[in-house]
Image (spheres, rainbow, N blue to C red):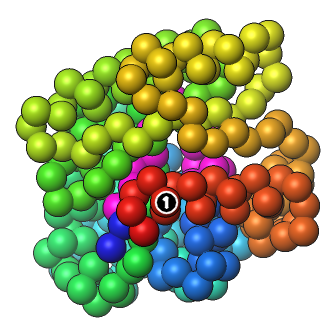
Amino acid sequence: MIKIAVYGKGGIGKSTTVSNVAAAMADMGLRVMQIGCDPKADSTVSLHGGTRIPAVLDLVREKKDFSLSDMVVQGYKGVICVEAGGPTPGLGCAGRGIIAALEKLREKGAYEAYKPDVVLYDVLGDVVCGGFSMPMRAGYADKVFVITSGENMAIYAAANIATAVNSFGNRGYAALGGIILNRRNVKNEDEKTAELASDMGTSVVGTISRCDLVTEAEELGKTVVEAFPDSEQAQEYRALARTLIDICGG
């Protein structure tokens, strides 16, 4: 089982990228589980028709007991979709939702029941502390990939995330697998991203072009891979999926 955590600042296109990678991996015949570790609980919407699914933290709050099937929805080509969720706005710590979700998945035997070939953790990375570092911990992800554009705030956030991953290395946490460039077509984008990767002792492992098809697909409640399978954009997501598998030893 390959376990990959993808981090990035809010609004960087992290969930879009992860969902398209999940769809591409499913097209390869792999059994994929995507776990959304964002309080908005919208990581997987494009994998199951644009609908929302029950978040684990909501189930914890609202039910005394619930089954594994309450936590999971199977989407495009059987992708196993889970959303951690978050606290009521203004109350509680968002990171606790991630901890609750991952602990409940283990408690309910999700990995044994579904036997995924690949697990993708989609993690909001504006901060890397508490529950937000949970997917990096031993037994969860094997590699962490950081998504950025060439925008200054995105580069700054990506540097913070990568620094945290590298500093956690002596604890047996997941290692940094590389940087993914999600283009915004800003000045010197390639150079700035390459410099970031070099500073962090890693490399740029994939590049995704800015493309209107992303928005068009999301309006249909689908990934680009599903809605426009023959497009160049879908091919970029497929290439990234293969690269991530290769890096993780699959």
Indicate whether residue 7 is drawn in magenta. yes
* Residue positioned 63% across, 42% down in the render: 206
In this rendering, the answer to whether 27 lies above or below 87 is: below
Q: Estimate the x, y position of residue 44 in percent, counting from the top left.
A: 56, 62
What residue is drawn where x is 79% and y is 16%? 186
Horizontally, is 64 left or right of 200 in the view?
left
Considering only vertical position in the picture, is 115 above or below 207?
Answer: below
Rendered residue at 24%/86% (across/down): 112
Identified by mark 1, the residue type is Asp
Q: Position of residue 51 (x, y in %)?
A: 64, 68
Quadrant, the C terminus: bottom left
> Residue 236 in magenta?
no
Task: Examine the rendering and report whether any part of residue 57 can be seen.
Answer: no
* Residue drawn at point x = 59 percent, y = 20 percent: 194
Q: Residue 28: x and y, percent?
A: 62, 79
Position of residue 183 in the picture relative to residue 66 (left or right):
right
Tell me which corner region of the image, top left, top right, bottom left or bottom right, holds residue 228: bottom right
Rendering quarter of residue 168: top left
**Residue placed most toward the observer, 152 or 162:** 162
Magenta stretch in the rendered image: 3-18
Where, by quadrant of the figure, is residue 46 drawn? bottom right
Q: According to the image, label 1 marks what residue?
A: 246
Q: Dot 1, how many residues are within 10 Å of its Cα: few (below 14), some (14-19), or many (20+)?
A: few
Determine the residue located farthest toward the left in the rendered image. 171
Total marks drawn? 1
Towards the viewer: 29 or 61: 29
